[in-house]
Amino acid sequence: MAGAAALTGAIAGFLFGIPHTIAAAGREPRDPREPRHLGNTNLEVVSDWLTKIIVGVGLIQLGHALPALARLGRNLRVPLGGQPSASAFGLALVISYAALGFLFGYLWSREKFPGQLRAADVLRHQLADSDQAATKAFKLVTEQLNSLKGGNLATPAELNQVIAAAPALARILCFTAADNMRAVHWRDDKPRMATAIPVFRALIAADGARELYQAHGALGWALKDQESPEWQAAAAELTEAIQIRDRLGVAGWKVYEATRALCHIKIVEQMPVDSRQSESLVGLINEDLAAAVTDSYASRLVAESADIQVWIDMLALRSEMSAAS
């Protein structure tokens, strides 16, 4: 009985307190983030309406409520034990729990329900904004990767801004598309491969937490493999990739050391023989090659690189000459 009365009262309280939408109030919100719900004033309207009924109809009509309550009390007497006090107890139970249910439903719909509606609106707009940002990022990245076909390209600053605003998953997908372009075309179509370079740079600029070591590594490879290699910049990006990889505790990826060794070999070849920087780079090259041969994938790159093999043979020759002298 208490549960039924409370549920009935709660439903009535909810109907009295349910918030209005702004559109229902006669206007649309200008800002999509503006709350779309207003507090309900039905209780005031109903109170005023009931007051007018009382004045207009008179106290005689209100007397019909008393027989109805009396019949309810008689009907509740037997289920509550048939005692003389059962009717009064039943009426008190129903009226008190109906009032409590009404109060609970009214307060909840006035205090809690609007907040949940606002949270749902905010989440809906956030998801819409996230979808829009992801779509814009995919569009610009696709245009950049197909820039050799023509069209109006975004500037590096615009690309950086759009990728920074995109959600994390969208940035990962942008990286996958750019890295696939680099991996497929680095041998046979270097100009097309180079279209991925601005995407890698934009992804790095958006990586405030410095966790996307793959983007640094891919940018280093792309700078190394383009038509006019930038050995110094490539080595710097590979160094950044190695530092982030080690900080995150990621195993493997010794191919970064193998590629950095190749970049430094090319840099050393352009330096004077007695350069101090050349001597320091020689030590770093040997350390990178020693690390690379411990990894099965990186060791294949070392074995297949003619420049690295020439370097290793030269070191072996120098060692033999030193031993002979």
Image (tube, helix red, strand yellow):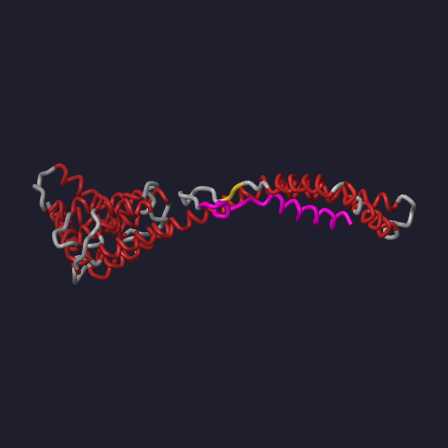
Residue 41, picture quadrant:
top right
| Residue at the spot 37% in from the left edge and 49% down from the top edge | 168
Q: How many marks?
A: 0
Position of 101 with respect to 31 (left or right) is: right
- Between 112 and 130, which is closer to the camera in this rendering? 112
The single residue placed furthest to the front in the displayed view is 56
Q: Residue 61 in the image: x percent, y percent?
A: 77, 45
**In this view, 198 is above or below 180:** above
Was residue 174 drawn as part of the magenta stretch in this picture?
no
Where is residue 78? Give x, y as percent: 88, 52
The range drawn in magenta is: 1-27
Is 60 displayed left or right of 37 in the figure?
Answer: right
Q: Quadrant of residue 299?
A: bottom left
Residue occupying image coordinates x 18% and y 39%: 280
- For this rendering, which residue is in front, 215 or 165? 165
Residue ID at (20%, 45%): 235
Q: Is residue 291 left or right of residue 44?
A: left
Instruction: Pick whichever, 23 or 103, lies toward us.
Output: 23
Q: Quadrant of the C terminus?
A: top left
Find the residue positioned furthest to the top.
276
Please state the horizontal and vertical placement of residue 212, each as a whole percent of the image: 32, 47
Q: Nearer the viewer, residue 24 or 308?
A: 24
Q: Left or right: 95 with respect to 16?
A: right
Q: Percent x, y for residue 203? A: 28, 47
